[in-house]
Amino acid sequence: MIEFFPLNQFSESEILNTHNEAFSNYEVPMQLSLEVFRYFNSRRGVRYDLSLGAVEGKRLIGFILNAIDFWNGKLTAYDCGTGIIPEFRQY
């Protein structure tokens, strides 16, 4: 059974590991270090408390990284990255 939890319940290392696994079979390599991952997420304004992780058992298998900011004068949430590890994409 897959459940969803706010990403602030996970360590950045767990989120990064899931990110790197989710993008492991892409043509363009997306294997990031923790330092680069933190930098990208900081620049994008990612809020882990507004982002979701998909969990099977105790394993983080996917994520939606969300940010919030003003766009055209309106407070707007936006997707900064979404990934699902390959073996769970068919669900």
Image (cartoon, rainbow, N blue to C red):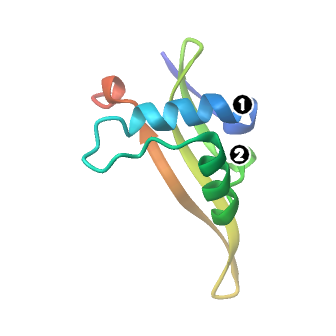
Q: What number is the disc on residue 89?
A: none
Residue that extends furthest to the bottom in the rendered view of this protein: 72
For badge 2, the amino acid type reads Tyr
The quarter of the image holding the C terminus is top left
Mark 1 surroundings: few (<14), some (14-19) or many (≥20) residues within 10 A: few
* Res. 64 visible in picture: yes
Mark 2 surroundings: few (<14), some (14-19) or many (≥20) residues within 10 A: many
Q: What number is the disc on residue 48?
A: 2
- Quadrant of residue 5 within the rendered picture: top right
Q: CA distance from mark 1 to mark 2?
A: 10 Å
* Res. 62 visible in picture: no
Residue drawn at (67%, 49%) of the image: 38
Counting residues from the N terminus, which is met first, the one under dot 1 or under dot 2?
1
User: Residue 7's x, y, as percent?
Assistant: 67, 37
**In the shown orientation, is residue 27 left or right of residue 47?**
left
Residue drawn at (74%, 30%) of the image: 9
The residue that label 1 is drawn on is 11
Q: Please tell me whether mark 1 sits on a helix, a strand or a loop.
A: loop
For badge 1, the amino acid type reads Ser
In the image, residue 9 sits, relative to residue 73, either above or below, namely: above
Q: Please tell me whether mark 2 sits on a helix, a strand or a loop.
A: helix
